[in-house]
Image: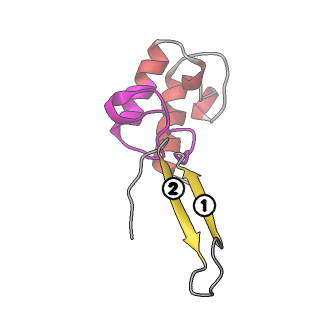
């Protein structure tokens, strides 16, 4: 059995020992699916929404640009020389650090 779920959805099932003549020897399991963060460049989801989704794709670029021009601290990811880290300034170093993180991929 396979199931495709989105973050925030719940998967409920019962695990049953069965076949041993003992009734009620099953365990109910409920699993909440959470998105896996995919590094600092994972800032966007479908439609360019500004939230991580566990993927690195075009939505991350759209979300990063939105965050950058809104002076959102999540876009302050670069320091002098394009090194990673926050420096309180929104400039080209943030773009360089974001692009570096993006192409480094998911850990």
Furthest toward the top, the residue is 70
Work out whether 10 lies above or below 95: below
Q: Quadrant of the N terminus?
A: bottom left
Q: Nearer the viewer, residue 50 or 10?
A: 10
Question: Circles 2 and 1: CB distance less than 8 Å?
Answer: yes
**Residue 11 percent location from the top left of the image:** 49, 54
Q: Nearer the viewer, residue 78 or 28?
A: 28
Work out whether 92 lies above or below 57: above
Q: Nearer the viewer, residue 99 or 65?
A: 65
Q: Quadrant of the C terminus?
A: bottom right
Q: CA distance from mark 2 to mark 1?
A: 8 Å
Name the residue that disc number 1 marks.
28
Q: Residue at x 66, y 31 (%)?
A: 85
Instruction: Kindly identify which numbered label has been placed on residue 88.
Output: none
* Left or right: 18 in relation to 69: right
* Left or right: 86 in relation to 63: right
Instruction: Kindly identify which numbered label has been placed on residue 12.
Output: 2
Q: Residue at x 60, y 31 (%)?
A: 81
**Residue 76 percent location from the top left of the image:** 59, 23
Q: Quadrant of residue 16?
A: bottom right
**Residue 15 percent location from the top left of the image:** 57, 70
**Residue 39 percent location from the top left of the image:** 57, 44
* Secondary structure type for disc 2: strand
In this picture, which residue range is highlighted in magenta? 35-64
**Predominant SS along the magenta part:** loop
* Left or right: 49 in relation to 47: right
Q: Residue at x 51, y 50 (%)?
A: 104
Work out whether 57 lies above or below 82: below
Q: Nearer the viewer, residue 2 or 107?
A: 2
Neighbours of disc 2 within 10 Å: few (<14), some (14-19), many (20+):
few
């Amino acid at each position: 059995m396979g199931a495709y779920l989105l973050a925030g959805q719940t998967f409920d099932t019962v695990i049953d020992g069965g076949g041993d003549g003992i009734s009620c020897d099953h365990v109910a399991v409920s699993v909440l699916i959470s998105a896996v963060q995919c590094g600092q460049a994972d800032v966007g989801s479908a439609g360019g929404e500004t939230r991580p989704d566990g993927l690195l794709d075009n939505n991350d670029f759209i979300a990063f640009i939105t965050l950058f021009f809104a002076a959102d601290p999540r876009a302050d990811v670069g320091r002098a020389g394009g090194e990673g880290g926050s420096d309180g300034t929104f400039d080209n170093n943030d773009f360089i650090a974001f692009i570096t993180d993006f192409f480094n991929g998911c850990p």
